[in-house]
């Protein structure tokens, strides 16, 4: 089974979620998800970000970590300024 991992960032820093259950309570994690067979990892990244943050974003494929069988993505969540 393949996984996706997505790093959210903007010009202020990198963002993650704080774990609130033991045994990893207090640790920070970035969005990740299993990719089911016949699914495309980019679609899984898009859906995971939308579900976890409510943002509609464009993620960029970075690389595949073959050791962890994981596709890595980055997503710029810069603040939008409306004119």
Image (tube, rainbow, N blue to C red):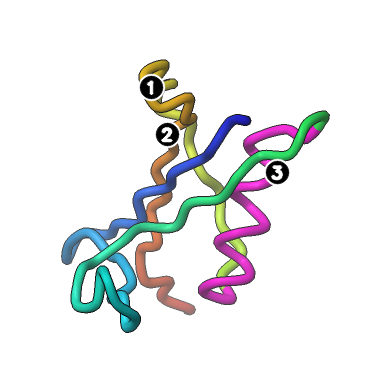
* Residue 45 locus on image (x, y percent): 59, 48
**Residue on which the image places disc 2:** 72
Q: Are marks 1 and 2 in contact (CB under 8 Å)?
A: yes
Q: Is residue 75 depicted above or below 64 in this figure? A: below
How many residues crowd mark 3 within 10 Å: few (<14), some (14–19), many (20+)?
Answer: few
Q: Helix, strand or loop at disc 2? A: strand
Q: Helix, strand or loop at disc 1? A: strand
Left or right: 25 in relation to 42:
left
Left or right: 43 in relation to 5:
right
Q: Quadrant of the N terminus?
A: top right
Going 47% across and 30% down the picture, which residue do you hit? 70
**Residue on which the image places disc 1:** 65
Q: Is residue 10 depicted above or below 4 in this figure? A: below
Q: Residue furthest top?
A: 66
Q: CA distance from mark 1 to mark 2?
A: 7 Å
Going 58% across and 30% down the picture, which residue do you hit? 2
**Residue on which the image places disc 3:** 43
* Residue 40 locus on image (x, y percent): 72, 32
Going 27% across and 59% down the picture, which residue do you hit? 10
**Which residue is nearer to you in this view: 36 or 23?**
23
Range covered by the magenta-colored residues: 39-54
Going 78% across and 31% down the picture, which residue do you hit? 37
- Sequence-first disc among 1 and 2: 1
């Amino acid at each position: 089974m393949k996984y996706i991992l997505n790093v959210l960032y903007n010009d202020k820093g990198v963002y993650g979620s704080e774990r609130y259950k033991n045994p990893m309570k207090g640790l920070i994690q970035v969005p990740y998800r299993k990719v089911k067979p016949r699914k495309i990892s980019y679609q899984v990244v898009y859906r995971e970000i939308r579900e976890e943050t409510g943002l509609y974003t464009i993620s960029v494929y970075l690389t595949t970590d073959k050791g962890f069988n994981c596709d890595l993505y980055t997503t710029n969540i810069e603040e939008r300024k409306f004119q």
